[in-house]
Image (spheres, grey):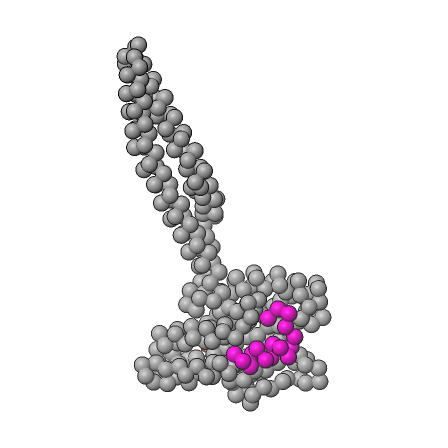
């Protein structure tokens, strides 16, 4: 099961500071500053030691200062570049953890809700169609018990891939928890959403999934709901999709069901029985 992850509060400001320091302009400035300070120190030392240095002494001091400044500035610059690379990698990794489900590689529940809350408010404000699909693997417990959890995990990945393949760029697919996936379809009317759900069902059914050479029976049940005038919160839409999903489960599984009232005149559309 994935876990949501919060990056530590200090990382973003540190990352910004290191990135600013690590830019080519800042690095050049830093090296120039180190060079000037080392040069001044070396010249000062020569004046102090020799009282009245001649031109050769000053030239020698300048050379020493240049060598010293290079010896300091180069490792410093290299260290800084390494720090920048390290912080950038950590930042990328944390972003991955915060937004993706580690097992399937699709969005996690929290990121889904963050993304979709915005889409949902826009759809409500501008009165555009949008729909939501809940996808639940059938008899998944039996897969785990019969073939083991590694098989179950791989199957979840395959189902996520198969579902994602059918989608448009703007659609948002996520692992909602356990063996359940959630799909938000912006600018999609109820009929369109039912078609997408049916395509996913067909793809999963045709997966031909096998474990150690043994075929594993795979199917999903899907519940579909769409935005309507009475919706105030996103969880109402999710609740309606969940009700439709329960109908799909009790109708024998491996089927798509629409929530009541999705298609006027049809309490529940059955795509496959
Ligand atoms: N391998 C694996 N199994 C998981 C994961 N998350 C949840 N499960 C299992 O999924 C199973 C869900 O079982 P149930 O809720 O009974 O559902 P089901 O067996 O699919 O039955 P129906 O949904 O009614 O068709 C449980 O055995 C969980 O342990 C996971 O990340 N990996």
Q: Quadrant of residue 244?
A: bottom right
Residue shown at the point (59%, 80%) measured from the top left: 195
Can residue 35 be seen by looking at this rendering? yes
Q: Nearer the viewer, residue 209 or 223?
A: 209
Q: Nearer the viewer, residue 87 or 53?
A: 53
Q: Is residue 90 above or below residue 265?
A: above
Q: Position of residue 218 (x, y in %)?
A: 44, 83
Q: Position of residue 201 (x, y in %)?
A: 51, 81
Residue shown at the point (54%, 84%) measured from the top left: 255
Q: Nearer the viewer, residue 271 or 43?
A: 43
Question: Is residue 196 magenta-colored?
Answer: yes
Which span is picked out in magenta? 185-200
Can residue 14 be seen by looking at this rendering? no
Q: Position of residue 82 (x, y in %)?
A: 36, 45
Direction from residue 171 to residue 29 in the image, left or right: left
Direction from residue 227 to residue 18 in the image, left or right: left
Q: Does the magenta stretch mainly form a helix, a strand or a loop?
A: helix
Q: Is residue 32 above or below residue 165?
A: above
The N terminus appears in which quarter of the rendering? bottom left
Residue shown at the point (44%, 41%) measured from the top left: 23
Q: Position of residue 123 (x, y in %)?
A: 67, 65
- Residue extending farthest top: 52
Residue shown at the point (27%, 12%) measured from the top left: 50
């Amino acid at each position: 099961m994935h876990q949501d992850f919060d990056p530590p509060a200090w990382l973003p400001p540190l990352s910004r500071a290191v990135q600013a320091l690590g830019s080519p302009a800042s690095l050049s400035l830093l090296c120039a500053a180190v060079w000037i300070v080392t040069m001044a120190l070396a010249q000062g030392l020569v004046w102090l030691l020799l009282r009245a240095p001649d031109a050769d002494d000053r030239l020698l001091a300048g050379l020493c200062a240049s060598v010293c400044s290079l010896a300091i500035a180069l490792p410093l610059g290299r260290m800084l570049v390494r720090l920048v690379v390290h912080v950038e990698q950590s930042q990328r990794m944390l972003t991955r953890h915060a937004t993706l489900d580690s097992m399937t590689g699709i969005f996690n529940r929290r990121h889904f809700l963050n993304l979709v809350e915005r889409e949902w408010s826009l759809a409500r404000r501008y009165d555009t169609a949008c729909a939501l699909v809940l996808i639940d693997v059938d008899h998944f417990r039996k897969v785990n018990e019969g073939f083991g959890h590694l098989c179950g995990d791989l199957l979840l990945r395959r189902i996520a891939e198969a579902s994602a393949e059918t989608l448009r760029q703007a659609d948002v697919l996520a692992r909602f928890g356990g063996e359940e996936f959630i799909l938000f379809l912006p600018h999609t009317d109820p009929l369109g959403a039912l078609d997408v759900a049916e395509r996913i069902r067909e793809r999963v059914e045709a997966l031909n999934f096998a474990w150690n050479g043994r075929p594993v029976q795979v199917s999903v049940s899907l519940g579909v709901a769409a935005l309507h005038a009475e919706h105030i919160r996103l969880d109402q839409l999710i609740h309606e999709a969940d009700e439709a999903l329960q109908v799909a489960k009790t109708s024998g599984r491996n089927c798509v069901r629409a929530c009541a009232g999705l298609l006027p005149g049809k309490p529940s559309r059955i795509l496959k029985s």
